[in-house]
């Protein structure tokens, strides 16, 4: 018999709404309601029983559809007495919420929790293109309460230099990784296609995927008019796609509450291990751009709690917004490049569809469904927010947990990450500099428009040299050259122009 305070996942649901008629298209609130009703149906409970919810947490949409979406959803579900929370932006939220509320349930703070979120950006965009405006507002007299503080992912200096959009930032990690691996540009591009081709195979088999199309490695890695470069070396097919209509919901309870609701124990999924970490926050301050101590510690702590090695986990869903996020996580977790396990159960953010901050809720839902089909096996889901900035992981199984559910305080292992020595940034560099990593931003016509560089002052021989951010001159020949040959390690001169650092590589 389980401890009554043992946290369990009892019901999951997800919705993908493609090509809806604009007259009947669902709002994000509609999608959340639908996914939640599916989760209740999955658990074998009635909609009326949702009125017993003690906590409702809504993962923030990229464009919040109404003033107070947690309140609006609670009213629809007949659960107005539930504590209502909204999360700030950050793709790590869904797994972090499972970790957080499993702990709260185990400590007796609550016993019935709904975690949900939705995006309807495809519908919203279609409405705007037709000359309309989404009529998604629900009257409210109060603003939502955030579960934890919001934080900008970039500082002013980074934003001024164009290093703030995810599609422009993650390529900086990618080129640093390529150099770290010792690969040529051509070899690495081929490997990126090979990394993502299996993701498309998973998406092609999923009824919930936005792009259920199997693609070859060459198709993914080759720039074409349909698959242009965005932030080089990433083609469009390597980018998270958020123009979708998707929602996912998870119901958590204590074992005692699950029994009182009448949920069959065959539905129960246990969180055997969990961990949460944060990297040194700003891109300016990272130790380097090809490793992550936060991810390494995450992998160590989640497996230690579960009492299982990384190689023993049966199913994986690594956060997959861009290839660099997958590769760095894989490296830090010690997963071999030729490991036969697939790295996704959904198809990933580029192919399943990246439902904004809530994508990992779809991962959790899919993992729960997969584990029920394979009783006794285990699955790990990871989540990432910011620019490899915030991380959460969970290891799930149908196997009951022996004894009391208890996790390690993340603050205990976060100290190791926070104590890292990292380069110092200067906002006003002058003189000679050496490129540490870079990317080239492309326009919609597939031509290069802007070079973003992260450099160190000096000739590259001093590991303690000051770091600086800069743009290159908008010279078409230079930008084209930066995509044909490796510019990491290239030297040049930096000057300021109206508050922007401009770095001109030498000898070109």
Image (tube, rainbow, N blue to C red):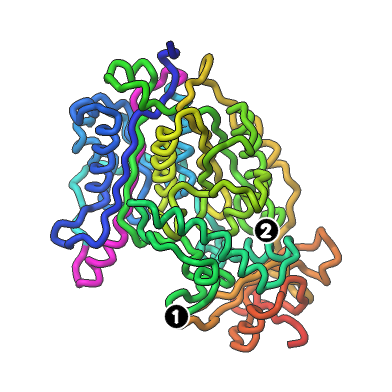
Within 10 Å of disc 2 (Cα), the crowding (few <14, some 14-19, many 20+) is many
The residue closer to the viewer here, 423 or 177, is 177
Quadrant, the C terminus: bottom right
User: What is the CA distance from the residue labelled 1 to the residue labelled 2?
Assistant: 30 Å
Q: Residue at x 66, y 79 (%)?
A: 482
Residue 448 in percent (x, y) is at: 55, 81
In magenta segment, residue 9? no
The magenta segment is 106-133
Quadrant, the N terminus: top left
Label number found at residue 225:
1
Disc number lying in front (1 or 2):
1
Q: Residue at x 77, y 86 (%)?
A: 507
In magenta segment, residue 119? yes
Residue 173 in percent (x, y) is at: 63, 61
Label 1 sits on a secondary structure element that is loop
Residue most toward the top? 1
Q: Is residue 270 above or below residue 136?
A: above
Mark 1 in CB contact with mark 2 (< 8 angstroms): no
Q: Which residue is mark 2?
A: 289
Residue 298 in percent (x, y) is at: 62, 39
Q: Is residue 34 left or right of residue 235?
A: left
Label number found at residue 370:
none
Label 2 sits on a secondary structure element that is loop
The residue closer to the viewer here, 266 or 508, is 266
Q: Is residue 134 above or below residue 49?
A: below
**Res. 426 visible in picture:** yes
Q: Residue at x 41, y 14 (%)?
A: 4
Q: Is residue 334 left or right of residue 343?
A: right
The residue closer to the viewer here, 12 or 438, is 12
Within 10 Å of disc 1 (Cα), the crowding (few <14, some 14-19, many 20+) is few
């Amino acid at each position: 018999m389980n401890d009554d305070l043992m946290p369990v996942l009892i019901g999951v649901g997800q919705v993908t709404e493609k090509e809806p008629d604009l007259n009947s298209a669902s709002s994000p609130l509609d999608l959340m309601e639908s996914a939640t009703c599916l989760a209740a149906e999955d658990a074998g409970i009635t909609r009326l029983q949702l009125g017993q919810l003690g906590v409702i947490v809504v993962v923030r949409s990229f464009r919040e559809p109404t003033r107070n979406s947690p309140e609006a959803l609670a009213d629809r579900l007949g659960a107005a007495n539930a504590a209502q929370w909204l999360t700030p932006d950050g793709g790590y939220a869904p797994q972090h919420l499972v970790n957080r509320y499993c702990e709260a349930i185990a400590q007796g703070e609550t016993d019935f929790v709904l975690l949900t979120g939705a995006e309807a950006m495809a519908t919203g965009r279609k409405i705007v293109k037709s000359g309309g405006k989404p009529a998604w507002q629900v009257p409210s007299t109060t603003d939502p309460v955030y579960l934890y503080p919001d934080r900008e992912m970039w500082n002013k200096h980074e934003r001024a230099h164009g290093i703030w959009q995810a599609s422009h930032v993650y390529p900086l990690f990618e080129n640093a990784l390529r150099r770290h691996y010792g690969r040529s540009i051509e070899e690495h591009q081929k490997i990126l296609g090979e990394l993502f081709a299996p993701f498309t195979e998973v998406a092609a088999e999923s009824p919930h995927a936005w792009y259920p199309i199997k693609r070859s490695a060459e198709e993914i890695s080759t720039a074409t008019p349909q698959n242009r470069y965005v932030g080089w070396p990433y083609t469009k097919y390597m980018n998270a796609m958020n123009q979708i209509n998707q929602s996912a919901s998870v119901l958590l309870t204590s074992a005692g509450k699950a029994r009182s609701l009448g949920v069959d124990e065959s539905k129960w999924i246990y969180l055997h291990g969990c961990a949460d970490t944060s990297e040194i926050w700003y891109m300016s301050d990272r130790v380097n751009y090809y490793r992550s101590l936060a991810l390494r510690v995450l992998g160590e702590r989640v497996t230690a709690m579960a009492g299982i090695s990384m190689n023993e986990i049966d199913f994986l869903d690594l956060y997959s917004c861009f290839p660099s996020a997958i590769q760095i996580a894989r490296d830090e977790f010690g997963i071999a490049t030729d490991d036969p396990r697939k790295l996704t159960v959904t198809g990933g953010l580029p192919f399943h569809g990246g439902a904004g901050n809530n994508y990992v809720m779809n991962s959790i839902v899919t993992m729960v469904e997969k584990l029920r089909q394979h009783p006794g096996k285990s699955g790990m889901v990871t989540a990432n927010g910011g620019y490899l900035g915030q991380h959460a992981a969970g290891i799930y199984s149908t196997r009951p947990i022996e004894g009391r559910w208890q996790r390690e305080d993340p603050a205990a292992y976060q100290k190791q990450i926070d104590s890292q020595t990292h380069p110092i940034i200067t906002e006003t560099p002058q003189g000679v500099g050496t490129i540490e990593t870079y990317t080239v931003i492309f326009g919609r016509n597939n031509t290069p428009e802007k070079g973003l560089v992260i450099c160190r002052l000096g000739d590259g021989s001093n590991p303690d040299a000051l770091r600086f951010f800069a743009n290159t001159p908008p010279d078409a020949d230079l930008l084209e050259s930066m995509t044909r040959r490796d510019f990491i390690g290239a030297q040049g001169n930096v000057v300021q122009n109206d508050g922007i650092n401009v770095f001109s590589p030498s000898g070109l």
